Image (tube, helix red, strand yellow):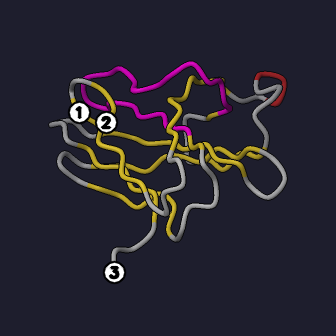
Amino acid sequence: PAAAEFTVCNQTESRVGVAIGYLGDKDWTTEGWWNLKPGGCETILPGQLDGRYYYVLARDWDKGGDWGGATPMCTQTKVFTINGIKDCKERGLDTSGFYEIDTGSEDSWTVQLTDDGVQ
């Protein structure tokens, strides 16, 4: 049987950093950065998916630019786990736009980062 998990694959020729947002036990949580080499995949959240909506932000470390979206969440430039997505600036954090992923009722999900966007 296939493993249940949330995976991100980097289908570009650049090194990419990935952050994720998800609903935790009490509040929204953001975590980052997973570093994906060109052509590499990383399991971001192991195990069966509990929620329907997940949020992804990816940064191209080599060429610059983001795969992001319209949902603001807290981030940092270094490795982070942040509880809560409000008052980012007041807490000394950055605000970044994340891309919404609707997993429906799926147990697992794979995001493909390409030069053309997120698939």
What is the C-alpha distance between the residues marked 3 and 1?
A: 27 Å
Kind of residue indicated by mark 1: Thr
* Labels 3 and 2: the sequence-earlier one: 3
The image shows residue 47, relative to residue 18, as above or below, that is: below
What secondary structure is the stretch in magenta mostly built from? strand
Where is residue 75? Give x, y as percent: 62, 34
37 or 44, nearer to the observer: 44
- Left or right of residue 83, residue 107 in this image: left
Residue 58 part of the magenta-drawn span:
yes
Give the number of the disc on residue 119: 2
Magenta segment? 55-74
* Labels 2 and 1: the sequence-earlier one: 1
- Left or right of residue 49, residue 36 in this image: left
The image shows residue 38, relative to residue 46, as above or below, that is: above
- Left or right of residue 38, residue 83 in this image: right
91 or 53, nearer to the observer: 53
Mark 1 Cα-neighbour bin, 10 Å: few <14, some 14–19, many ≥20: some
Give the number of the disc on residue 84: none
Kind of residue indicated by mark 2: Gln
Q: Secondary structure at mark 3?
A: loop
Label 1 sits on residue: 114
Front position among marks 2 and 1:
2
Q: Secondary structure at mark 1?
A: strand
Callout 2 touching callout 1 (CB < 8 Å): yes
Where is residue 104? Give x, y as percent: 53, 47
Kind of residue indicated by mark 3: Pro
Where is residue 39? Give x, y as percent: 17, 49
What is the C-alpha distance between the residues marked 2 and 1?
A: 7 Å
Q: Residue most toward the bottom?
A: 1
Determine the image quadrant of residue 64.
Answer: top left
What is the C-alpha distance between the residues marked 3 and 2?
A: 23 Å
